[in-house]
Amino acid sequence: MSNPTPDTPTPPAADPGAFQTMVARTVYQEDPRLRSTALATLLSLMPGLGQVYLGYTQQGFINVLVVGSTIAILSRNIGGLEPLLGLFLAFFWLYNIVDANRRAVLLNQRILGLAPGALPEDVSPEIRGSVLGGLALIVAGVLALAHLRFGLSMAWVERWWPVALIGFGIYLVWKAVKASRE
């Protein structure tokens, strides 16, 4: 029987669970890619921050947008939907916290080779060019500037904003049909 090296912990005969905990702590201290599940959970109290800490930046930004949009909608008096949106917000916020913890556990398992799956790319979201998105931002900026600097009334936007949703929906359908023909 060979003697273990000084760096290799020897398993105690009485408690194999303690040995696994000791090995896990040793591995955690040695691999800088591992993430703290407690820190990911704590950071996710601010929606999306736990996911960004773990490297899931796109999911983190989506969580921020969902929570921010819901709060913005709730701040307007929308006529009876406040309880439903408030319940959705509470559920989504709790989901965000649980999701960050779950992702941290799965990420650590994947790093240690205990679970299949790909690791997240630890980079910020790629900014790609979009003609439609660029034009929409230009139009919104020109209208905002005209309103702020030249007093252009924006009352029509409140009545006609759904046209933008219809236009975007038509664009998505056109893009999907075009992609299916190729």
Image (spheres, rainbow, N blue to C red):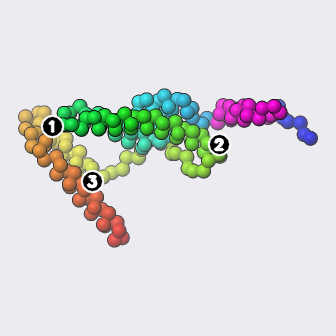
Q: Which residue is mark 1?
A: 145
> Which of pointers 1 and 2 lies earlier in the amino acid sequence?
2
Residue type at mark 3: give it. Val
Residue topped by disc 2 = 112
Residue 132 appears left or right of 100: left
Q: Quadrant of residue 110?
A: top right
* Sequence-first disc among 3 and 2: 2
Indicate which label's residue lies in the foreground, 3 or 2.
2
Left or right of 156? Residue 93 is: right
Say if mark 1 contacts mark 2, CB within 8 Å.
no
Q: Quadrant of residue 61?
A: top left
Above or below: residue 151 compared with residue 177: above
The picture places residue 14, in percent across and down from the top left corner, at 81, 31
Q: Mark 1 and mark 2: span between their CA atoms?
A: 53 Å
In front of the other: 177 or 93: 93
Along the line of sight, which residue is nearer the eye, 77 or 146? 77
Residue holding disc 3: 131
Our reading of the magenta stretch's main secondary structure is helix
Label 1 vs label 3: CA separation?
Answer: 21 Å
State the image coordinates of residue 94 (x, y, percent, origin top left). 42, 34
Label 2: few (<14), some (14–19) or many (≥20) C-alpha neighbours in 10 Å: some
Judged from the image, the secondary structure of the residue bearing numbered disc 3 is helix
**Dot 1: element:** helix
Q: Find the magenta span and give its range.
A: 7-31
Percent from the top left, x then y, of residue 37? 55, 33
Answer whether residue 30 is magenta in the image: yes
Where residue 147 sits in the image (x, y, percent)? Answer: 11, 36
